Amino acid sequence: MPALLRLDHIECRYDDQIVVRDLSFELEPGQIACLLGPSGCGKTTVLRAIAGFEPIHSGEIQLNDEIISRADYLRPPEQRGLGMVFQDYALFPHLSVADNIVFGLRKHRRQDKAHIAERMLDLVGLQGMGNRFPHELSGGQQQRVALARALAPHPPLILLDEPFSNLDVDLRERLSREVRDILKTAGTAGILVTHDQHEAFAMGECIGVMHAGRVLQCASPHALYHEPETRFVADFIGQGVFLKGRTLSENRIETEIGRMQSTRPLDLPPGSAVDVLLRPDDVVPDDLGGMATTVIDSAFKGAEILYTLALPSGTRLLALFPSHRNHAPGDTVRIHLDAEHVVAFPRSD
C-alpha cells in the first residue's frame, strides 16, 4: 500500500538552532501514529511542518505522492486538505455546536451543512447537542466538537496537537481510545503529538519516540515497552530499573540474580559491563525459592501493588504483584525473574 504521508530526511530550524534533525517516517492511509517525547524534543514542530505552519530547511514532505514542503517550496496550510485539532479546542464561543462544526464548509448549501453537522455529531457521540454553545459543554465534549469540525470536510489525515492536555488524567486516556475509534470509523488517518505515554498507548498503532529532534524508534506499544532499541527509549517508556551485569557470550549475561539470555545479540566481547533492563512484570514472587529481597516501599494500584524491593547488595528492583499479596516495608519477599524479553545496554557509568 502506498504511503499517505512521507517525511524524507527533514530538518527544521528556529533561527540558527536545529530543532528537527534528519527525520523520516511514513504513514499509511487510515493508520494512527503518535509522536511521543518530552517537552522540547521537536514533536510539535514536526506536526506544524506537516500542517504547513512551519517551513523545512532540507528534505521534503509528500502527501499522496505530491510534494507539499521542501526547502524552496511551502504549500499553504489551507491547500493541504488536512484536519487539525488544537490543544485549546479553538471553538467560536458565539456559534452553536452545529455552526462550529460546519464553519469551514463555505461552499456547501445550508441544507447540506445541516446534514453534515448531524452526521458528525452522531459520529462523535453528541447527538442532539447541535443547538448548544461551547460554554454549555464539558471539556471532553468540546474536544469532540473540535474533532467533528476537523472531520467535517472528510480530510485524509487529522493532526492532533496535545488535544487532551487540558483534561483530567482518567478522561484523557478514555477520550484517547474514543478518538481512535472515531477515526477508525471515519477511515481517517491521524497523527497525535503528546508527552503522555498513556495517551500514546491508548491511541497509537505506531509510536515514534522523539529525543533531541530525532525519532529514536518507531514501533508498536508492545515493542517499545519490551524491545526498546536505545537506552533513552528504555528509560522513557514504562517503568523499570537497570541491573548491572557482565556478558558471558554473545547473548548470555551474568547478574547478581542469576544468568539471563538476551533477546538479541549484544555485539560486545565477553566480560563487558552491561545494564540489563528489568520491568516490574519481569519480577515475580517465589515463596518456594528464589532470592530473598526486602520491601522498601509500595504503591497500591487496585488489582496490583507496585513494590520497591532491595536485593542483599542494596540494588533496588520494581515488582508488580497481585494486590492480595500485601507486604509492609521491612518484610522479606522471595522472588525470581520471569523475563521473556531481556534487553541490555553497555554500562553507562
Image (tube, rainbow, N blue to C red):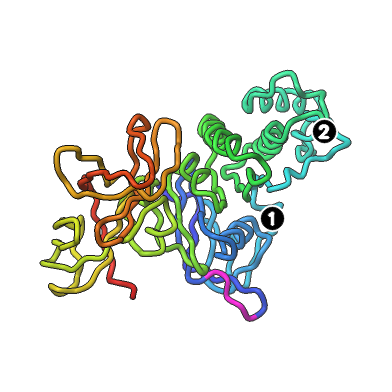
Q: Please state which amino acid type lies under the numbered disc 2.
A: His
Label 2 sits on a secondary structure element that is helix
Q: Which mark is residue 289?
A: none
Task: Report the number of discs.
Answer: 2
User: Residue 3's x, y, as percent?
Assistant: 45, 51
Q: Quadrant of the C terminus?
A: bottom left
Q: Residue at x 32, y 61 (%)?
A: 242
Q: Residue at x 50, y 71 (%)?
A: 21
How far separated are the C-alphas under marks 2 and 1? 28 Å
Q: Looking at the image, is 347 positioned above or below residue 100?
A: below
Label 1 sits on a secondary structure element that is helix
Which class describes the residues within 10 Å of circle 2: few (<14), some (14-19), or many (20+)?
some
The quadrant holding residue 118 is: top right
The quadrant holding residue 131 is: top right
Q: Which residue in the structure is indicated by mark 2?
A: 135
Q: Quadrant of the N terminus?
A: top left
Q: Which residue in the structure is indicated by mark 1?
A: 77
Q: Which residues are magenta?
A: 16-20
Q: Residue at x 41, y 55 (%)?
A: 218
71 within the magenta span: no
Q: Please state which amino acid type lies under the numbered disc 1.
A: Pro
Q: Residue furthest front?
A: 330
Q: Main secondary structure of the magenta part?
A: strand
